[in-house]
Amino acid sequence: MKNLSILSGQELDFVLNTDIKIQNKIFRKIQPKINSNVKEESIDCEGLLLIPGFINAHTHIGDSIGKDVTLDNSVDKKIHPVFGAKAKILKNTSQENLANFMKNTCHSMIRKGITTFVDFREGGLDGVILLKKVLSDIPLRSIILGRIEFYQGSTEIKQNLSFPKEKIEDLTTLLKKCDGIGISGANENSTSVLNYYSKTTKLRAIHSSETKQSVSVSKKITGKSETIRALSLKPHFLVHMTYASKNDLSTVAKKTRGIVICPRANSSLAEGIPDIELMKKAGCTIALGTDNIMINSPDMFREMDFLWKVTMGLHKKRIDPKEILKMATVNGGKILKKDIGVIEIGKIADCIFLDKHALDLEPMHNPYASIVHRASESTIKAVMIGGKIVHGKI
């Protein structure tokens, strides 16, 4: 590919014109005027800006069938894993119907430049198998974090009851089929159970401090903060942290790879906005996710735009849009420890080709601001995953 503008490396440095050679799914060369063999395909990319593919670091695509139901209910009434409307919808919907709407969501993500998504998959082993079946003919990179449908109440948590022996085989089988575990939260699991999960060897993540209520429930049941209890899982990353304290965030920065925030989902649940300034001051790496399809569209452009503007509006302080873009790309790769989210030699060629001459983007004086709050699905010329164009054309 010749005559490309790109956002290069971990700092998304803007390079006005360069060539890129992709071979065996990875970036092999990134430099001006690469000489190509006669046999190699060469494409003139004049007018295009290449950016890393978006990493949607937290989704629940299983509830794609329940878009905007129970709009006015509380968080627990909507999405509580035991008695929420979401749990009832998933239980009472056929696997075929669920699969069809999950497939729609996957195609939607690709068209919006999402090249990897990390799904907290409900439904135990069956849920994981269903999602893998959906993805079998879709060229979308996925990281599936499964879950045993086992939850404890406040009494069991107070008594610190251990993980039941009859569930051990279920967990072992589940982990053979997915990339790790995505735990609902500390308020549905005793410390003993979280400790048990912490011994699993694959990726571990957990929801934490999403609402004021969940924070107060943890204190009431155990006398400890929800985040400190969540850390009993030894998670690689935590999700939400909307109401985490300064001390909690400092501890998380030391003990995990980072935090995945979902600002539009938190807002649509009327639960507030994650404080990214406080998180950054504590030293946390922050990535972005779009959360439940039931309450939110899987659109990283909208996620970035919302977070950037609402944070500046609340704090009356300017934020570099590059930092927001890193949350949607580079930082996701760091938290997952995968060679994705960055245009760099040796990294996987997952990327988005944006039309610099698109009506909404031209003239592009600040590429980071343009991408964060002006770009959209309509400005995408093509999406590449593993060196192959999977949507659009260049």
Image: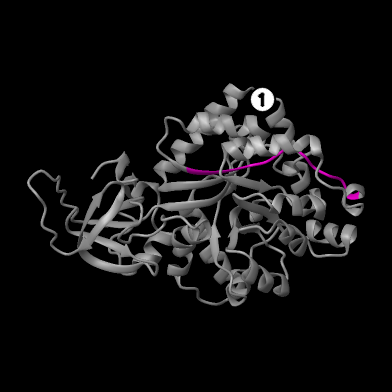
Q: Position of residue 1 (x, y in %)?
A: 19, 52
Which color scheme did the rendering employ for the protein?
one colour
**Secondary-structure class at tag 1:** loop
The residues colored magenta run 142-154
Image x and y of residue 228, in percent: 76, 64
Say whether residue 63 is left or right of residue 83.
Answer: left
Residue 17 vs 177, above or below: the answer is below
State the residue position of label 1. Answer: 93
Residue 103 seen from this side: yes
Instruction: Tell me where residue 389 appears, x and y as whole percent.
Output: 30, 42
Residue 214 occupies quadrant: bottom right
Image check: 370 left or right of 274? left
Give the quarter of the figure containing the C terminus: top left
Around disc 1, counting alpha carbons within 10 Å, would you say few (fewer than 14), some (14 to 19), or many (20 or more)?
Answer: few
Q: Name the residue type under label 1.
A: Thr
171 relative to 188 in the view: left or right: left
Total label count? 1
Residue at the image position 77 percent from the left and 60 percent from the top: 229
Q: Is residue 297 magenta?
A: no
> Residue visible at 78% across and 39% down?
82
Is any atom of residue 358 visible in this view?
no
55 horizontally vs 259: left or right: left
Can you give x and y, in whole percent of width and height, for residue 325 in the image?
44, 63
Q: Is residue 74 above or below residue 9?
A: above
Q: Quadrant of residue 171?
A: top right
- Toward the left, the furthest residue is 38
